[in-house]
Image (spheres, rainbow, N blue to C red):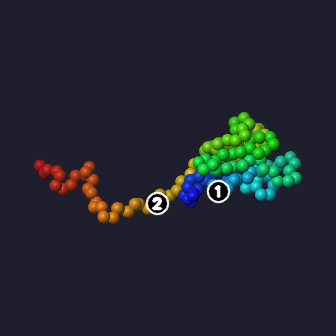
Amino acid sequence: MPTEASALAASLTVWAGPTRYVFTPGRDVVVGYGPGCDLPLERLGNPPQPPPAPRVDVILRFTGTQWVAIDLSRRGIFVNGSRVPTVEIRDGLGITIEDPQRGPRLAFQTAPAATPPGPPAAPQPGRPNEPDPRIPTPGSYTHL
């Protein structure tokens, strides 16, 4: 079972224009038009004609080791101008939905967020502190 720490390490940050979304593993992320979408494309611009019913264009899924984007749109998802049915998401990847030049663009960040360092580790109980052999002790040097 994933721990909270592993879920944080596997979190996915998606930039849709100036808006930032953060998702954690556990369920698919729905990208599309209409109600029920976790990342609604209406916010990225004005589509020519809003679809009459909810429409899912992309599913973002955590596979246990990485995130993938799965195309469910009618016109495709594009990476560097090439249409792909599925793409492994890596840090810095960008995809465009439906139109490689004018479609909504998503940018991904997969690197874990920096966490503040924890408290220093306590010495092991029952273990004597051993002197550092690199530091001279009072009896280890001679006086001239």
Type of the residue with mark 1: Gly
Q: Which mark is residue 118?
A: 2
Q: Residue at x 54, y 54 (%)?
A: 114
Task: Find residue 37 and report its horizontal and vertical position in percent.
Answer: 76, 55
Q: Quadrant of the N terminus?
A: bottom right
Check disc 1 and report the residue beneath it.
26
Q: Which mark is residue 124?
A: none
Image: 48 above or below 25: above
Q: Is residue 35 left or right of residue 144?
A: right
Image: 89 above or below 126: above
Image: 61 above or below 79: below
Neighbor class of circle 2 (other Cα within 10 Å; few <14, some 14-19, many 20+) is few
Q: Quadrant of residue 6?
A: bottom right
Q: CA distance from mark 1 to mark 2?
A: 27 Å
Determine whether the residue tagged by mark 2 lies in a helix, strand or loop. Answer: loop
Determine whether the residue tagged by mark 1 lies in a helix, strand or loop. Answer: loop
- Residue sitting at the far top: 82
Assess whether mark 2 and mark 1 are in contact (beta carbons under 8 angstroms).
no
Q: Nearer the viewer, residue 136 or 110?
A: 110
Q: Residue at x 59, y 52 (%)?
A: 10
Q: Nearer the viewer, residue 37 or 42?
A: 37
Q: Residue at x 70, y 53 (%)?
A: 29
Task: Find residue 143 and report its horizontal and vertical position in percent.
Answer: 13, 51
Q: Is residue 119 left or right of residue 88?
A: left
Which one is earlier in the sequence, the residue at label 1 or at label 2? 1
Neighbor class of circle 1 (other Cα within 10 Å; few <14, some 14-19, many 20+) is few
- Residue sitting at the far left: 144
Task: Find residue 95 and report its horizontal and vertical position in percent.
Answer: 70, 42
Q: Residue at x 77, y 40 (%)?
A: 76
Task: Find residue 142 and report its horizontal and vertical position in percent.
Answer: 14, 50
Total tally of numbered discs in the picture? 2
Type of the residue with mark 2: Gly
